[in-house]
Image (tube, rainbow, N blue to C red):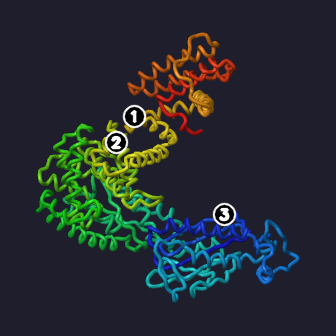
Amino acid sequence: MPQFLLELFSEEIPARMQAAATRDLERLAGAGLSEVGLAFDRMAAFAGPRRLTLVVDGLPLLEPKRKVERKGPRLGAPAAAIEGFLRSAGVGAESMVERDGAYFVLSETGGRPTEEVLASITSSLVGSFPWPKSMTWADGDLRWVRPLRRILCVFDRKAVPVAIGGVVGADLSEGRRFTGQTPIFRARDFDEYREALAGHFVVLSAEERKQRILDGARALCAGRGLELVEDPGLLEEVAGMVEWPAPLLGDIDDRFLDLPPEVIRTTMRVHQRYFATSRAGELAPYFIAVANIEAADGGALIAAGNARVLAARLGDARFFWDEDLKVSLESRLRRLEGVVFHDKLGTLFDRALRLESAAKAIAPLVGADPAAAALAGRLAKADLVSAMVGELPELQGVMGSYYARAEGIPEDVALAIGEHYRPRGPTDRAPTAPVSVAVALADKIDTIVGFFSIGERPTGSKDPFALRRAALGVIRILLEGRIRAPLKDLAAICGAAGADRGALLAFFVDRLKVLLREGGRRHDLVDAVFALGDDDIVRVVDRIGALSDLLDTDEGANLLAGYRRAGNILDAETKKGPLPKGEPRGPSGSPQEEGLRLAIATAQANVGVMTANEDFAGAVRELAGLREPVDAFFDKVLVNSEDPAERDDRLRLLAQVRETMGRVADFSRISG
């Protein structure tokens, strides 16, 4: 079947936009083809520094014909309106039918050559492409991420006639610029295109470019007894900057090796896009750069040039380091008075005072020294006005810890300053040292409570103040450290009086669901446990784990079904009037009633003790013991007995089943 090949060749596409661009290219092309009924076998998209490419296999030569129904004017409309409708539809009055108070016509469309349809889809795709940022040129007729220079547009090995913003489609593309020359080549299908690109020093696939970088960098490191410091984010970015990746090894000037290793690594990463290397777990005096050319000398000259540029950058870092060491963290605090955190939440100095108070109050809950926690909270933001952090904001907190150690501040305080932003994301570790935990919790909860108090909550996909990340950080710190600190208590410490505490708790519940879902746990159990009013995250998750294990068994599934059956009966009876009060009567009922009564009595006693001791696995095992007597009860006993006393007694039994199970969770909130 024929193939469609499209390449949109432009000036440099920012690396950060390329992955999303491939997804958008496939999505828009797929939607365009679907709209006209063009089926295909396979579609793939690729992105690189200067091109977006789409290949679609298995398209037909003609657009399929299809029936289209159009609704026209209402019945009784003026003749002129009806005539205009018929003209626009291209049919006569005999094709018009009456239905649902209006005129309709059924017409046939389609049948165009596929290349004509593809030209239209391509023009529409380019015109509506959702670049985060784009440029306008060609007298304002064309918007693209950067000026569009070429369009390779081929179907069934023939060029498709398309023109966009003065750029005319053809079967031509170009390879990597080399020694001032731009090689032009012809491509009439994807295999020919990909082979020509490789022959002109372009690797089309981003995944292949990333693998080449990794393989080359690891080989260079192995030759020197080094290890590559893996950095997926940097790898993604560099792969989007080069078309023919050629890793090379360079030296870091020994003069700078006494700088904090984070300064060296961040300078290399942020300013130069170099990869760091290590030896025995420590930063090694070498870097990996990725050139866009395989030089005749193996890259020695390029590496030497990169090393000189890095030395200049590290010279700046040395100056910042030396200057920052002349000023104490405490003396920097007053400079925070001139930095606004938020116009409704005060300055960074105000925030430092809040963190000092909150960390001191949280300290006893996490086993930390209150005085140390207070000092760390007070100084945590002081490095934000340092020269180094001004140049490399990624090092906030980290530099504060170095400056604290240089001043002779106790290690637990210095460590807490360095760790109070952690965990920064899902792959970052959470702090475990008590003082670090106190300050990290204070920092995150103060942020969440503060913005909730002024009505700045996340909405949809928008979360400008990273409150979701902060909440996940709080949850991870509590869970990984098994810290018994109820959320309401933590929020109260951080001044939640001005915030909606119900909304705050619901926000944390949603974040816990996300975390559990990512960990493969049943997130629908979160509501069932939180409904009990418990907000101790450790205890909540322990309950959820025990419940999840039970409900993954046939016994648990059947018990849940029995609970729902009991609940449905009780809910129906409640609509008729109040349920009967009191305890079920003595052993005068059926054997099944008596068996259920005894099972409930045993479960109530044991579940109460076990939940008090936080043995939730034991508590759910006790609930599992109700499964057989509940099944037997529903199998042999008619709840709605003609004897009112008997009926009331059986309703009391079902109410006890619900109450007993409700000591572990609200089973009515469990799905599945």
Q: Which residue is mark 3?
A: 42
Q: Is residue 640 left or right of residue 609?
A: right
| Distance from the alpha carbon under mark 1 to that under mark 2 | 14 Å
Inspect the image, locate mark 2, and give the three-letter code of the amino acid beneath it: Lys
- In the rendered view, would you say 177 is above or below 519? below
Q: Is residue 558 left or right of residue 63?
A: left
Q: Position of residue 442 (x, y in %)?
A: 27, 48
Quarter where residue 624 is shown: top right
- In the rendered view, would you say 439 is above or below 168? above
Quarter where residue 82 is shown: bottom right
Residue 48 visible? The answer is: yes
- In the rendered view, would you say 265 is above or below 171? above
Question: What residue is shown at x 47% (from left), y 43% (from top)?
Answer: 516
Question: What residue is shown at x 83% (from left), y 79% (from top)?
Answer: 91
Q: In front here: 220 or 584?
A: 584
Q: In front here: 145 or 549?
A: 549
Q: Position of residue 431 (x, y in %)?
A: 30, 45
| Distance from the alpha carbon under mark 1 to that under mark 3 | 49 Å
Q: Residues within 10 Å of mark 1 (few under 14, many from 20)?
A: many
Q: Which residue is mark 1?
A: 539
Question: What residue is shown at x 63% (from left), y 71% (from top)?
Answer: 190
Inspect the image, locate mark 1, and give the three-letter code of the amino acid beneath it: Arg
Inspect the image, locate mark 3, and give the three-letter code of the amino acid beneath it: Arg
Question: Which tag, 1 or 2, sits closer to the chain's start?
Answer: 2
Say which element carries label 2.
helix
Q: Residue furthest front?
A: 577
Q: Quadrant of the N terminus?
A: bottom right
- In the rendered view, would you say 484 is above or below 343? above
Q: Position of residue 246 (x, y in %)?
A: 42, 68
* Number of the label disc, if any, that sits on residue 488: 2
Count all numbered tags in the image, as a single digit: 3
